[in-house]
Image (spheres, rainbow, N blue to C red):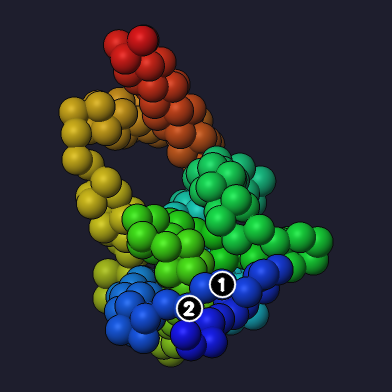
Amino acid sequence: MTRAETVGVPGSDTQTPHIEPQARRTVLRDGISIGVATGTYGLSFGALAAAAGLSLAQTSALSLLMFTGASQFAFVGVIAAGGAPLAGAMSAALLGSRNALYGLHLSRLLRLRGVRRFGTAQFVIDESAAMSLDRGAEALSRLGFWSAGIGVFVCWNIATAVGALGAQLISDPSTYGLDVVAPAAFVALIAPRLKDLETWRAAFLGAAVALAFVPFVPAGVTVLMSACVVTIVAVRSSRTSAAGEA
């Protein structure tokens, strides 16, 4: 009989059972790959933020503190369109609210307390939540969360700074098409999620409402209206599905 080995996971209250080196390497490789791939969007965000008039410090602060791509693009997109910062912040908050749902699952997986739990919330994003699913063992799920969360955080913030610095060297960002970065980035973020009829329906209705009210409401408000419509459609769809399963 050999001595049981354990491995630690950052911030965990307990030691986790030994996991095979090959499995660890696979999860770490996936997490780093996701970090690099997602981080490249940070170049676009940094460029867009600079084009919207934000300083390098303000742009970097958004990535460090807000750290959720869709919300950041929404906030800067509203500012770039001439909207009020409050409208941008509300749009960002609506889009970022999904992270709270991820937190319900991850709180049971990570089992953190106090300050560590508060700090770990910064890494709760789409990618880290996805990497924590279906790993076959809690140790691998936790490793997946941390590898993706930290990987994306580091790459995203570096890319944000590089994108902002690069855009500041350009006298007229619209000459290089930077004024269309926000809508292009949203399409790239949303497209992989359009997998069924209900999702397409929600996206179509949200876009239709936004386009219909653009001439009549201040910049940024259409984003809030669209988000409300999508939320209503999603809730009704969930209730219909639940009723069908009952």
Circle 2/circle 1 CB separation < 8 Å:
no
Residue at left offset 27%, top offset 46%? 193
The quadrant holding residue 16 is: bottom right
Q: Position of residue 177 (x, y in %)?
A: 27, 69
Q: Is residue 55 visible?
A: no
| Residue lying at the far front of the rendered structure | 1
Q: Position of residue 84 (x, y in %)?
A: 62, 47
Q: Which amino acid type is marked by label 2?
A: His
The quadrant holding residue 45 is: bottom left
72 or 211, which is in the foreground? 72
Residue at left offset 23%, top offset 51%? 192
For disc 1, the neighbor class at 10 Å (few under 14, some 14 to 19, many from 20) is some
| Residue lying at the far right of the rendered structure | 114
Q: How many marks overall?
A: 2
How far apart marks 2 and 1 lie (CA) works out to: 7 Å
Q: Quadrant of the C terminus?
A: top left
Q: Which residue is mark 1?
A: 16
Q: Is residue 23 visible?
A: yes
Element on which disc 2 rests = loop
Q: Is 97 on the left or on the right of 164, as rendered?
A: right
Q: Position of residue 116 (x, y in %)?
A: 74, 68
Q: Which residue is mark 2?
A: 18
- 88 versus 224 height, above or below: below
Q: Which amino acid type is marked by label 1?
A: Thr
99 or 214, which is in the foreground? 99
Element on which disc 1 rests = strand
Question: Which disc is residue 105 wearing?
Answer: none
111 or 224, which is in the foreground? 111
